Amino acid sequence: MTSDTVRLTLRPVMARRTLIGGAMSLATLSGLAACAPADSGSTPSTTPPAGADVKESPRLTKLVEAGELPPLEERLPTNPVVVDLVEGPGQYGGTLRYASTSDGITPITILSPSGYLEWDLPGLRQLPSVAESFEPNETSDVWTITIRDGLKWSDGEPFTSDDVDFAFADYLGNDTIFPAAPYFWSDANQNKPTVDWVDDRTFTVTFGTSNPLFPQYMAHVVNGWQLFKPMHYLKQFHPDHVGDEEATKVAKAAGFDTWDKYFVDRSNAWVNPDLPVLGAYRVVSPSGGSGTATLERNPYYFKTDPDGRQLPYIDRISVQILNQEALDLRAANGELDLQGTGLAFSGAQVLLENADDRGYRVARWVNSGGTAAVIPNLSHKDPELRELFTDVRFRQALSHAINRDDVNEALLSGIGVIRQPIASEGTDYWVEGAGETFLEYDPAKSEALLDELGMTKTGQWRTRPDGKPFEPVMMFVESSNQVPLASCFQMVINDFAKVGLKVVLKPVDGTLYTQLRVSNDFDLDGTSAPSDHMDLEDVWWIPTSASNHFGAGFGQYYQTKGESGEKPTPEMQQLMDNWDALKTANNDEERIAAGQAIIQQHKEKVYMIGVVRPPFQPVVVTEQTKNVLPDEAPFSYATGREGLTHVEQVWLNQE
């Protein structure tokens, strides 16, 4: 990534990502829910059609003419990011309608992210954004970053080296706010880096070890909003700038026990409209009380289209906080202009049936998550069960016992994707045959493997190898956003029963589920597992913490450097060693080789037993909403879900 790379290319092609299973049709889906009439649509725009002569929103032009805003050339950086548009130049104005089921920071990460780097398409590589250049040394332990000249916060104040230091030292580097180093701001030894300035716009970030994942962490949309803290505003809440007594006094006056809690609250763009931001939009009216948040364009945003017209095109975004039923209904009525997050595949039938009448289309994006999976606890506290679960033959037996075609037909009308939840073709870490092992429904083979393991059949049920009854519990949290898990896992344990395995299915709430997993107090975990971005969500594939799903005890051991948890088996240690090699690789070749070794081990050892995943993630796009990525765009937490289309270049056709 060099300083010459300043053009953000949005290409409507996804040639390297394919859906396993071929063409998809929803003709077999049955039933149709009734929907209420749609409303009159988005806020009308009086903006003239797109044209190279209109360089900014007319709303901003009026403010410039009134002397309330500097002219455009004074608001843009010297070298703005130029966005190649998905479809073409857009029209200024309008209000985009969006919704969320959670009243938190998530809408910002989707609709108005900011980062030193940002994702290209198809979400595999990183391009400069706030950073004009972002370069490693030969060993990837020192990264040299140059910020764009002339960047400004949304209130017009310059973005300077003071802001960089404030975010890195006073926020990420503060031991009260972050007692442990954040994963995205630390090296392989969990130590924070040092920052040194080369000149007014260029600084180095130096880690104690190689850190080849640093660019991905910087592009991750959930990390991005934590990297930028306006010193001129936030210093009034920080004891290093106003003293401990004053910071505590201000915090308590606002109803907070400690200064750090108030500081974090004031630095949250979702709840604090006074906070200056770098993203395309800023919250001007939080959702508290009314249930609807209003976002307005940032007049100092640093991107333009190819004609030099400042982005974003759309003036406002309305974010309604809704329960799941209301969100589904609004989407089916055509009352949401761009919506993927919160939409379950189970509702795709209703969306498709109503699309033409309600004036929207349903884009079919590829969801990197959502594979229903059965995961044995390989670090089980019971040594006999641990020995059984860590034997690959047991996991192969479970996999071959599952009639995935029946589950697919019953729950997804036969069009789901059957695979194990590991890296997809076209991603960095994919290896030949990944995701395709031990999928055949072969109960005879399953029984033979169980016999080899010494799991004797007494009547209908098998015993453990030590002769004790085998009655493990599979916990899960009910969800229908992807595959309906309760129905899916009931069919799975019915299949297990056919080969003599008595498994008890136990629904639990999310809090208990997490407690049981991190305390290593469970037998089998039923969940929805991701497939891609292994290096950004390593806890799924490598026991790096107690949150790991197949080896929580091993993960605790790794996380605490052996002070607690369960000592890993040689096989688990191999995963950990390859992970350490990946995250300390000197270059991409070494990183990819280590990642492929991890995926190869998963392919052979099937630690997470996949059942089926939906064929696509529905994304609702109304007829007037333009510059949205087409079918097969990646729908991923790390890349911002539907926000990967870069909402700043989305526009509303009101003609």
Image (cartoon, grey):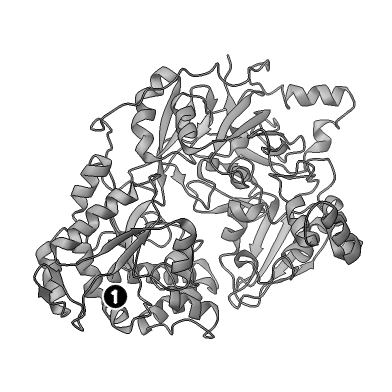
Residue holding disc 1: 389
What's the residue at 90%, 26% (across, down)? 67
Spot occupied by residue 228 in the image (x, y as percentages of width and height): 73, 54
What's the residue at 85%, 31% (across, down)? 69
Spot occupied by residue 378 in the image (x, y as percentages of width and height): 35, 75
What's the residue at 29%, 75% (across, down)? 389
Give whichever of 41, 118 is nearer the camera. 41
Q: Quadrant of residue 85?
A: top right
Spot occupied by residue 267 in the image (x, y as percentages of width and height): 75, 52
Spot occupied by residue 213 in the image (x, y as percentages of width and height): 56, 65
Residue 261 vertical position relative to residue 348 in the rendered view, above or below:
below
Q: Quadrant of residue 610?
A: bottom left
Name the image quarter holding the N terminus.
bottom right
Name the image quarter holding the C terminus.
top right
Image check: 594 left or right of 625?
left
Image check: 468 left or right of 590?
left
Q: Amino acid at mark 1?
A: Phe
Determine if residue 434 is in view: no
What secondary structure is marked by label 1?
Answer: helix
What's the residue at 21%, 75% (across, down)? 469
